[in-house]
Image: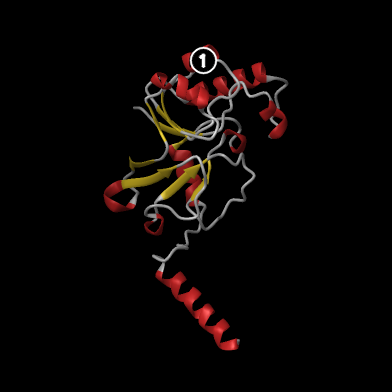
Amino acid sequence: MSEIFFTSDTHFYHDNIITFCERPFADVTEMNEALIRRWNEKVKRGDLVYHLGDFALKCSVQEANAVLDQLNGQIILIRGNHDSVAEQVKHRFAAIKDYDEIKVNDEEAPHNGKRKIVLLHYAMRVWHSSHHGAWHLYGHSHGTLPDDPQSLSFDVGVDCWNFTPLSYAEVKAVMAQKSFSPVDHHGASDRAGILSSDAKRLSEN
């Protein structure tokens, strides 16, 4: 049975990312080999991987193809800000998109056993159906953006997760530790609290 995985910000061939993110690799060769090995230890050929951007950087088309030749699974790429090389080998991906919303079969999920997940390279404070408990996965920040324990979102970048993709089950386990609290105008209790606070502040002025 095939599985769904999520990852981001592999930065294959990007030597400076080793310094920028303090990755524990001596050079890009060691980094690439480790990323490919850890990917394939979890992802099988029939699996689907959503890669949330910044696949590779500062490499040739031939080098990008060589990496793709070694990675298991079909890959859907959500464009990041460093994906010009990926665009040149776009035929190697199952799809390339700027943004995606998916529904994953999960009998424990609300809304007829369908889990809605919003995918974007960048983190959002609110997203489509966030007030109904939809999840949001992102990358870009390499673990530097503080996680919000009350938000059903988090960074799936490799720098946060031991340089491996996360399965849907692993994502679900992370979300289970969250304390969901709507923050936009659809969260009635939150809106009431904000309005009450504003009214009090105005009355004091």
Q: Is residue 4 above or below residue 57?
A: below
Q: Residue furthest left?
A: 112
Q: Position of residue 104 (x, y in %)?
A: 34, 41
Residue name at image x 47 percent, y 52 percent:
152
Task: Tell me which corner region of the image, top left, top right, bottom left or bottom right, holds residue 188.
Answer: bottom left
Q: Is residue 185 above or below residue 17?
A: below
Q: Which of 143/106 is in front?
A: 143
Q: Quadrant for the N terminus, please.
A: top left
SS under mark 1: helix
Q: Is residue 84 above or below residue 119?
A: above
Q: Position of residue 82 (x, y in %)?
A: 55, 31
Q: Is residue 134 left or right of residue 139?
A: left
Q: Is residue 141 left or right of residue 165?
A: right
Q: Quadrant for the C terminus, please.
A: bottom right
Q: Position of residue 92 (x, y in %)?
A: 41, 19
Residue name at image x 46 percent, y 41 percent:
120
Task: Tell me which corner region of the image, top left, top right, bottom left or bottom right, holds residue 24.
Answer: top right
Q: Amino acid at mark 1?
A: Val
Disc 1 marks which residue?
Answer: 61
Instruction: Estimate how packed mark 1 is, as few (under 14), some (14 to 19) or many (20 or more) residues with alpha carbons within 10 Å.
Output: few
Residue name at image x 55 percent, y 20 percent:
36
